[in-house]
Amino acid sequence: MTPKWRATRLLHGVRALVGGQGHPLILLPGWPQTAEAFSGIFEPLSKYYQFFALDPPGLGDSLPPLNGYDTANVSKIMAEAIHDILKERPYHLVGHDVGGWIAYPWAAQFQSRIKSLSIMDASVPGFMPQLQFPLPHQTNMRLWQFSFNALPELPEILTRGRERELLTWFFNLKTVHADGLPEDHFERYIQAYSRPGAMSRGFEYYRAFGTSAKQNLEYAKIPLDIPVLALGGASSVGSDMIHLVQKFATKVSGGAVHDCGHFLPEEQPSAVAHRLLEFLEANQTG
């Protein structure tokens, strides 16, 4: 049977999964994932939208960025790749996790091209609450990767050859149910991040976090005026996503997705598709 979506290579070596028909919808996954993270919601989205699920530069099968992993640079690379395909067509933008880090500066730099922005369970650089150390246990369990991944050399030393062990522990920690992540997705991520240099490229996003935060605080001096949907897993960021996004946008809605950890599109695909489609339909005009 012919697949309903196809993989292709865009400008700057950005890998995309493309399908559906209608108004354009851009989907950005996080770390340690690939564009397949959204495949559980491709079917309902494809009935109304032409989706482009992208591997961010350096993640999955996309080429690494030439000028650094700060999200102002990475988002510009991805925007150029999409604008090369869509020309002047406006689009909706959705980001989860690191994809949410990228989606905000993308929207800040190219707001006139974007109909709406959706951010799912993402600690967007520059807008996290100030933390005091040592962290409480529950906070440390949720945010350990921000410190560990940003260290020089040590993450590579400890994870090389043990990618499966790390990712197994990571996904088990951040999902509500043991089977929260589809097995084929998990194996895809193992395959992608066991390649030489792949884990390092993911760590570089965390090493650039401080630079990205400074950039975002500058962008936030002019708040976004487009509709923004902020969703968090009830067992993860939850409805606090709304408060985070209100720091840089004026038209914010959203809340918590119940019975869900960090990986919203995979743990609760039906609920996420429903919330997303409802929001997109309400903001389709123009």
Image (cartoon, rainbow, N blue to C red):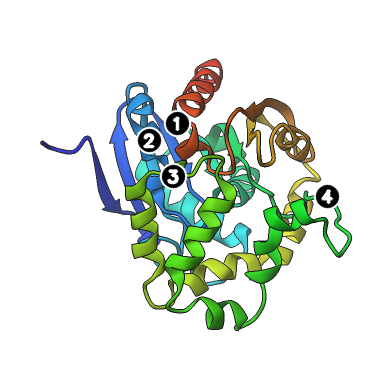
The residue mark sitting in front, 1 or 4, is 1
Dot placed on the residue nearer the N-terminal end, 1 or 4: 4
- Mark 2 highlights which residue? 40
Q: Is residue 271 left or right of residue 22?
A: right
Kind of residue indicated by mark 2: Gly
- Give me the C-alpha separation between circle 3 and circle 4: 28 Å
Q: Secondary structure at mark 3?
A: loop
Dot placed on the residue nearer the N-terminal end, 3 or 4: 4
Dot placed on the residue nearer the N-terminal end, 4 or 2: 2
Viewer can see residue 180: yes
The residue mark sitting in front, 1 or 3, is 3
Are the residues at dot 3 and dot 4 in contact (C-beta closer than 8 Å)? no
Q: Secondary structure at mark 1?
A: helix
Dot placed on the residue nearer the N-terminal end, 3 or 2: 2
- Give me the C-alpha separation between circle 1 and circle 3: 11 Å
Task: Please name the residue shown 55% across and 58% down the image.
Answer: 170
Kind of residue indicated by mark 1: Pro
- Mark 1 highlights which residue? 269
Callout 4 environment at 10 Å: few (<14), some (14 to 19), or many (20+)?
few
Are the residues at dot 1 and dot 3 in contact (C-beta closer than 8 Å)? no
Are the residues at dot 3 and dot 2 in contact (C-beta closer than 8 Å)? no
Q: Is residue 21 left or right of residue 105?
A: left
Kind of residue indicated by mark 4: Pro
- Mark 4 highlights which residue? 129
The relative height of residue 178 versus residue 232 in the rendered view (above or below) is below
Q: Position of residue 143 (x, y in %)?
A: 70, 57
Instruction: Quadrant for residue 87, please give it.
Output: top left
Task: Please name the residue shown 32% across and 49% down the image.
Answer: 184
Callout 3 environment at 10 Å: few (<14), some (14 to 19), or many (20+)?
many
The relative height of residue 117 versus residue 106 in the rendered view (above or below) is above
- Give me the C-alpha separation between circle 1 and circle 2: 6 Å
